[in-house]
Image (tube, rainbow, N blue to C red):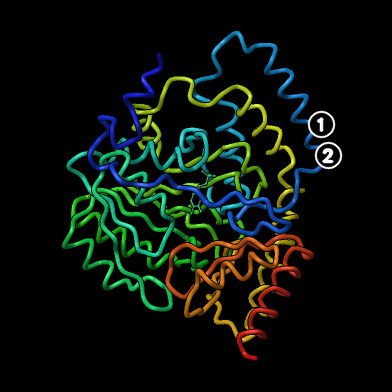
């Protein structure tokens, strides 16, 4: 007997009240010719890197009877070297922490700095996992404002922070799903507001940092122990399947997340694979340059079709406006191209794919606009 005759669904289980009636996060994984809906990198890892991963994983496999390096020492050292080289500020292993995707980094930060009786704020529309992980860690969520052009209204944001006194402030730059990046000045003002109000932790989510026209906000951690920059290998490194995210901050923040991380959370296989990918940084960043050019082409060509397009610093583009964005999403899907409906009324989001994928997407949009105008 497995109890199935007594338990008919989630609502019959004694789950936490705040999870009742909620649906799990997840973009549709549909089997269509062109998938441009999850901001993945369209380029498979190059063969020499695949071979190097096989070598490093084989070496790790010889020691799988043992737990992995709990502190991911070698990997954090290499991530620090990568940031130092590319983000304009020198960090060491002591500044860096890694986990299974930046979602886990965010979860660990919320477990440490949020939690029951505490709150987090983000400026929406933004990355929905900030609010969802807040909820799952028992952290109250505050939806902060954005302007109609999707930039952050700094005065309004400062007011919201002063009034609500959140424990964690999320600044997503470039922002998902809008593509909007923020400058140093904005982050500094929000940081000051957050310190005056509480003080609280400011998390700058730079998952798409490598695609931006602007420099990384990483140098701002200097002298600001409550500022964290989170990053991922899912996008620029083309390794979404790897599940490797990381943060850079004052070493005290790295010490603090040790209080909540599971022992041996990062498998030896993950660490070996990430190290192999970091050896091929230059090749992978070459793909980033191609994707930036394709992103810019998408912006230009979408505008030429008459669409409104939000300026993008990421590997995706937000476009509209549609009277019925879900119907537009479906019409594009009917032409074999999957884009993302993030629930922002009037807008959809498309990830920059290969030139061929982007052409297929642009053809679909042109066809729809022609139909609608005829
Ligand atoms: C803004 C932002 N942050 C974080 C993530 C999480 O990335 P991962 O957990 O794959 O590192 C994503 C993924 O789409 C994202 O868009």
**Farthest top residue?**
65
SS for dot 1? helix
Residue 61: where, in percent of width, then height?
69, 16
Residue 4: where, in percent of width, then height?
38, 23
Label 2 crowding class (10 Å Cα cut-off): few <14, some 14-19, many 20+? few
For the residue pair 85 and 70, the one nearer the viewer reads as 70
**Farthest bottom residue?**
374
Residue 203: where, in percent of width, then height?
38, 50
Cα separation between marks 1 and 2: 6 Å
Tell me which residue sits at (58%, 67%) in the image. 330
Tell me which residue sits at (25%, 66%) in the image. 158
Q: Quadrant of residue 157?
A: bottom left
Q: Tell me the quadrant of the picture where the C terminus can be found.
A: bottom right
SS for dot 2? helix
Whether ligand 1 has any atom under 8 Å from the Cβ at mark 2 is answered as no
Callouts 1 and 2 close, C-beta under 8 Å: yes
The numbered dot on residue 308 is: none
Q: Is residue 363 above or below residue 34?
A: below
Q: Using residue 296 as the reference point, say whether residue 136 is left or right of it.
A: left
Tell me which residue sits at (30%, 38%) in the image. 137
């Amino acid at each position: 007997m497995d109890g199935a005759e007594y338990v008919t669904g989630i609502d019959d289980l004694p789950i936490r009240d705040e999870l009742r009636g909620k649906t799990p996060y997840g973009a549709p994984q549909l089997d269509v010719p062109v998938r441009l809906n999850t901001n993945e990198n369209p380029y498979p890892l190059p063969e020499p890197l695949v071979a190097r991963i096989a070598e490093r994983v084989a070496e790790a496999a010889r020691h799988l009877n043992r737990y992995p390096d709990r502190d991911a020492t070698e990997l954090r050292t290499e991530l620090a070297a990568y940031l130092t080289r590319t983000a304009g500020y020198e960090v060491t292993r002591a500044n860096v922490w890694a986990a299974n995707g930046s979602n886990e980094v965010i979860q660990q930060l919320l477990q440490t700095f949020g939690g029951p009786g505490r709150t987090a704020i983000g400026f929406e529309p933004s990355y929905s996992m900030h609010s969802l992980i807040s909820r799952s860690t028992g952290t109250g969520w505050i939806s902060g404002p954005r302007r109609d052009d999707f930039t952050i209204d700094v005065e309004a944001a400062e007011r919201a922070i002063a009034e609500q006194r959140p424990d964690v402030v999320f600044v997503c730059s470039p922002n998902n799903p809008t593509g909007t990046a923020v400058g140093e000045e904005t982050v500094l003002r929000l940081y000051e507001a957050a310190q005056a109000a509480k003080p609280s932790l400011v998390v700058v989510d730079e998952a798409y940092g490598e695609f931006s026209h602007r420099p990384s906000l990483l140098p701002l951690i200097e002298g600001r122990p409550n500022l964290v920059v989170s990053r991922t290998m899912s996008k620029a490194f083309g390794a979404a399947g790897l599940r490797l995210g990381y943060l850079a901050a004052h070493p005290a923040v790295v010490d603090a997340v040790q209080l909540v991380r599971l022992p041996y959370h990062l498998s030896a296989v993950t660490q070996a694979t990430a190290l192999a990918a970091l050896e091929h940084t230059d090749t992978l960043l070459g793909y980033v340059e191609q994707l930036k050019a394709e992103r810019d082409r998408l912006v230009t060509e979408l505008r030429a079709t008459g669409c409104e397009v939000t300026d993008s610093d990421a590997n995706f583009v937000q476009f509209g406006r549609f009277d019925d964005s879900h119907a537009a999403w479906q019409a594009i899907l009917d032409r074999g191209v999957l884009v993302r409906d993030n629930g922002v009324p009037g807008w959809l989001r498309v990830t920059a794919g290969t030139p061929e994928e982007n052409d297929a997407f642009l053809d679909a949009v042109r066809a729809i606009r022609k139909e609608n105008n005829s």
